[in-house]
Image: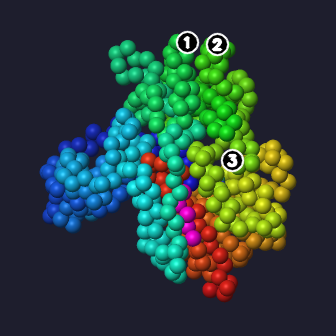
Amino acid sequence: MTRSKKPTTRTKTTDTKSNHKRPGRPAGAEDLSGLPVAKNEDYTADIVGIGHEGEGVGRVNGYTLFVPGALPGEKVRVKVVKVKKQYGYAKLLEVLEASPDRIDAPCPIYKQCGGCQLQHLSYEAQMRWKRQLVIDNLTRIGKLQVVGEREEGIIVHPTLGMSDPWRYRNKAQVPIGLAETEEGGLVGGFYAQGSHRIIDMEACLIQHENNDAVVGAVKKIARELGIRPYSEETGRGLLRHVIARYGFNTGEIMVVLVTNGRDLPHADELTGLIRRDVPGVTSIVQNINTRETNVIFGDETRTLWGSDVIYDTIGDIRFAISARSFYQVNPVQTEVLYGKALEYAALTGRETVIDAYCGIGTISLFLAQKADQVYGVEIVPEAIEDARANARLNGIRNASFEAGPAEVVIPAWRGKGIAPDVIVVDPPRKGCDPALLETILAMRPERVVYVSCNPSTLARDLRVLEDGGFRTVQVQPVDMFPHTVHVESVAVLVRGEAGEA
Ligand code: SAH
């Protein structure tokens, strides 16, 4: 599943200038002669799809142009900004024929920010597009048959969206920096698209209001106390990130200050002011990150005031969330997603269940209430510690956890005679390891429930399971990240009568 948005992929481009104005074509560069479009020229493009980043995919004389801001079905006027052999990029100049699904993006900083990609598409159309993307991947990559309700084949249900698809995030991770004005000063917000320039932000429409308020209060206090913002350029300054986490169902609030160094001047005054200005705060934590990196957290975390964790609930299960714990960012839809996973697992109370890629045990503990025994495996040891603590917290005794790669741990379980009736997988974007899929086929569970944040690897892996004798019955897309291109879905497979084909 898609985990939070991090600016980790943006790299500095300080060395590109030296490559300019080389005479002739450098060795290995593409031959771009004879293309149907030319750089800096205007064209009319027909938009036929939505690309990975939410951009319109257009055609001009059979050539593909990616056009940010354009929507399928539209005819647009564009200026070509970059050409490659197979495709190019263009800037939207004018929408000549607008899609009926086009709306004005409600967020005033939508274009600069890049955190959301689909705000200019109506929510209803986003839901339709997400379902269609799942179907397209299943048919094209998985070579699977997708059908309507009563025919043979896989049912892909309409996307389960949110009744109010705004203000859904429970975690804000805000980079802090120095304003690029003469006065300087501390700003905190988001990186302007494609750069490392931090733009100050007061409100994010997909963020819970509390998180906006917390970040705003911390920035104000830091300014008052003269806490220096970190500068990526010089590696100097103290405050790097402010993270706000909010327990939707408990109201508990955690503030994390990521600092470039252990020494935090005015620490008592700082926590006192945060407690004064952030009603409901239960945990104030410092994380120390002195490395020159885009990675937000450093290795050392210490609690400045209050509890080390905040609590939240999903269904009947209570979770302890520490500063660095992975926890689903959309708690409302998480409950919908896990509810589907539970329904698809069809548990009666007698089953042995394996939860591969279990994180802090969220799905495992959800399933344990309805199963005989649950085994969870996850590669991050701290997450496994959290999973065990969460099991204890809820008095759940029929769930056990092991740290390690699923593709190594599960074969070892098989060696010990553990025979699951149901296997649940919830892998990262790259999908399941082939060795894990092989083990699933060898273990021959009755059912496999596949929770996926990437329809293309879902489709690839379903093909392998189908070839091994499983049949995909239904797939439910669930909108975990409204207004973004991320598509989450859960699929259920049953073992065919023939066992392995
Ligand atoms: N099911 C959990 C977490 C899913 S995120 C939830 O819903 O909250 C995917 C998880 O897979 C991450 O926690 C990641 O650390 C873990 N992971 C990645 N590669 C893995 C591997 N090879 N074996 C086991 N876990 C892995």
Quadrant position of the C terminus in the picture: bottom right
Quadrant position of the N terminus in the picture: bottom right
* Marker disc for residue 314: 3
State the image coordinates of residue 479 (x, y, percent, origin top left): 52, 54
- Please name the amino acid that badge 2 sits on: Glu
Disc 3 crowd, CA 10 A, few/some/many (<14, 14-19, 20+): some
Q: Rounded to the nearest whole Å, what is the CA distance between mark 3 and mark 1? A: 38 Å
Give the residue pinned by disc 1: 225
State the image coordinates of residue 372 (x, y, percent, origin top left): 82, 64
Contact? badges 2 and 1 (CB < 8 Å): yes
At x 51%, y 24%, the residue is: 216
State the image coordinates of residue 94 (x, y, percent, origin top left): 20, 47
Disc 1 crowd, CA 10 A, few/some/many (<14, 14-19, 20+): some
Magenta segment boundaries in residue numbering: 474-478
Q: As displayed, is residue 323 above or below residue 31?
A: above
Give the residue pinned by disc 2: 269
Contact? badges 3 and 1 (CB < 8 Å): no
- Please name the amino acid that badge 1 sits on: Leu
At x 81%, y 46%, the residue is: 394
